[in-house]
Image (cartoon, rainbow, N blue to C red):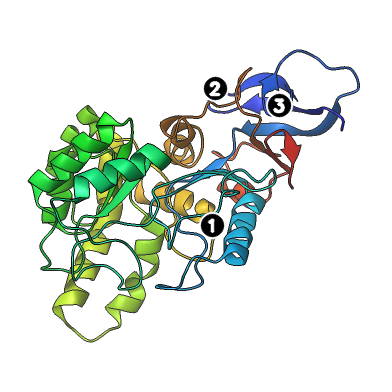
Amino acid sequence: MSVLRIRGRALPSGEAVDLYADGDRWTTDPVAGADLVAEGWLLPGLVDAHTHPGAEEVGAPLDDDTLRADLRRHADSGVTLIRAPGLAGHPPKWFGEEPDLPRAVHAGPWFAQQGQFFDAWGRRPSHTDLPGLAASQAASTGWVKLIGDWKPGDPPFPEAVVRDVVDAVHAVGGRVAVHAQNAEGCAVAVAAGVDSLEHGMWLDPALLTQMAAQGTALTPTLAALSGSLEKRRDQPDSPGKRWYVGGASAHPALVAAAAEAGVTLLAGTDSRPHGRVADEIRALVKAGVPAHDALAAGSWSAREYLGLQGLQPGAPADAVVYAQDPREDLDQLEQPLAVILRGRRVR
């Protein structure tokens, strides 16, 4: 197989680079006869940091064929790395390893409290057993996911329990992601020092400075929340409707404030259809996040947060190539010239 080569202006710096794929690593050492597959504006691949592939619908079991199809859609869109903070089951060994499908990190099945979350998904151990089980999960996969709160009025995980989980998971070198969409659940997650807050609807803006200081990332899933807003507005009045409409309406301003406060933002799509992280990047820009920072949340910054380097010698050989600077024209995200994954062209 011939050596693959790309060249152009590499983001985030915009500097000109000429890269060759030495297996699954980039090198700047020229290789005679290398196949120049694309040139233009280069990203180290897109990242969807909050996606749940593999299940056709809520409560459905993890299915291999569905998982492959979902991951194929991600790769076709330019996503070379995903984070699955919660799956419908333990994934097969090939997950994250297939040559033409995205790299992946995951948290295994969710941890939730009794009476919360979707009945057929997740694990619901006692508060006493949770830290040990979470540490065991994180030791295996690197991440653990808590459903920190659920419906309006439901009690969140107690702060002391979340702190114990964070301590136990950090002790084995893992990280903790927490779903929270109520003010109290968000406050508990931030106070406990979790690594990433997922959704964050109704997050008190006063907590953003603390999040930035302690390194708690925010994955706002803004496009998914905003996309359901009009439908919820058309529903009959109820406490649940008022909760959702109020939180989702305020969410864009919260996300823009988080970016200004220096909170690490991660682009994530949450729900089906897969392969739509470009929608989340656009939603961040529409909310007021600078295009450079919004693209970072779905590319180089997210990649660095998840432990992978960008476009430099020795880094994993992933890239997506565009004809124009995608920061200036977000429509470029829909039409990559080439998608490179593990040193192979997959689109």
Provide the secondary structure element on which disc 3 rests: strand
Percent position (x, y) of residue 226?
36, 63
N-term mark: 2 or 1: 2
Dividing the picture into quadrants, the one containing residue 151 is bottom left
Mark 3 Cα-neighbour bin, 10 Å: few <14, some 14–19, many ≥20:
many
Q: In this view, does 140 lie above or below 301?
A: below
Residue behind mark 2: 13
Residue 252 to residue 27: above or below? below
What residue type is disc 3 on? Gly
Which residue is under mark 3?
8
Q: Nearer the viewer, residue 145 or 150?
A: 145
Residue at 25% in and 30% down? 171
The picture quadrant where one finds residue 20 is top right
Picture layout, residue 144 above or below residue 152: above
**Labels 2 & 1 near each other (Cβ < 8 A):** no
Query: Could you tell me if the residues under marks 3 and 2 are in contact, i.e. CB atoms within 8 Å?
Result: no
Closer to the camera in the image, 91 or 286: 91
Q: How many labels does the image show?
A: 3
Q: What element carries label 1?
A: loop
3 vs 1, front mark = 1
Q: How far apart are marks 2 and 1 (CA)?
A: 25 Å
- Disc 2 versus disc 1: nearer the observer: 1
Tell me, for residue 276, which label it has, or none: 1
Query: Crowdedness of circle 1 by 10 Å Cα count: few (<14), some, many (20+)?
Result: many
The answer for how far apart the CA atoms under marks 3 and 1 are is 25 Å
Residue 26, position as x, y percentages in the image: 68, 23
Location of residue 33 in the rendering, given as x and y in whole percent from the top left corner: 91, 22
